[in-house]
Amino acid sequence: QQGATNTTTSLNDYSVIVSQTGASQTNNVSLSLSCSGNDNNGYWFALSNPFMGRLDISKFLTANTGINTIITGKTVYTYNAISGWEGKNTGEIYPAQGFMVAKSSSGSLSISINANQQIGKVGNKESNVNEIKPLSDMITFIVQANGIEKKVYANINERAENGFDDNDAFALFSNNNENIIDPYFEVENKNIFKNEFKSLPYQVPINFHSSKASEVRLSAHNIPNDVNVSIIDITTNEERDLRDSDFCFVANIGENENRFIVSFSKNEVGINDI
């Protein structure tokens, strides 16, 4: 998508909806874009990261010298629901995340989004440091109730913070089906279905959005050998090691907040345990 704006002070004054479809890429992507007309405030282009790895903004800008700085000394603009539009000259763009760049004058603009611009890429070789982990490889919590399963995920990621950050993902509730129990982590008063954190030990409240009283079974999967995962029932002081057994309880109508905490800690694995 491409077009001109009417201001040089802020992108937050405009509501723009851009959708994208297509498969993720592994090869370099080259784009030849153009814009015309007469606008003194720059010509803006909507792009997205086509790779499954994070895109390094510094590497991207080094390879694309035709992009101009238009607003507040920044060159790449991303959007999040917390702070709106953010201008950046460094940092990273997540897989499939959209971003805006600008050209100061009309004409053509060549864009190169290359595989070696990804964080964790050295040439065309993949580094083992800070790889993007798919949900299927994360610690997975499965909630079973009324014959329906729902999942939430946790991941230890040295690039994340122990508080809320861009690595986390918001939870969406299934309000149209009273038989579904929606689990979610509560991180800094935000409802999260994917919680990535930096270090151990770590504890986080887990709530269960329920439209009716239901019997619930909670189990944990994909637990690394060097990590302990347990759930603490605050009301009874019971702690259950989720590697050893599932945890069963009755969910009340509502959020079931202030009832449960999930605890992550280091597991000192002995030689006889390997």
Image (spheres, grey):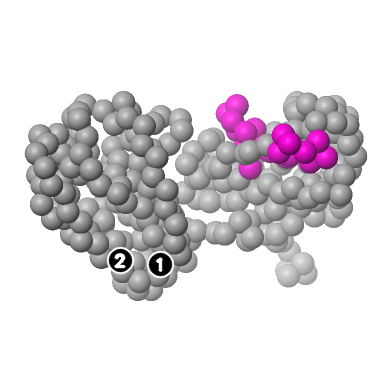
Question: Is residue 70 covered in magenta?
Answer: no
In the image, what residue occupies the spot 36% across and 53% down? 48
Image quadrant of residue 210?
A: top right
| Residue 172 point in image, percent of width and height | 63, 38
The answer to whether the residue labelled 1 contacts the one labelled 2, judged by CB atoms less than 8 Å apart, is: yes
In the image, what residue occupies the spot 30% across and 41% down? 77
| Residue 204 point in image, percent of width and height | 67, 36
Tag 2 residue = 29
User: Quick check: can you spot residue 234?
Assistant: no
Q: Secondary structure at mark 1?
A: loop
Residue 25's tag is 1
| Residue 81 point in image, percent of width and height | 46, 33
Which amino acid, by three-letter code, is at mark 2?
A: Val
| Residue 64 point in image, percent of width and height | 19, 56
Over which residues does the magenta segment extend? Answer: 174-193
Question: Is residue 185 covered in magenta?
Answer: yes
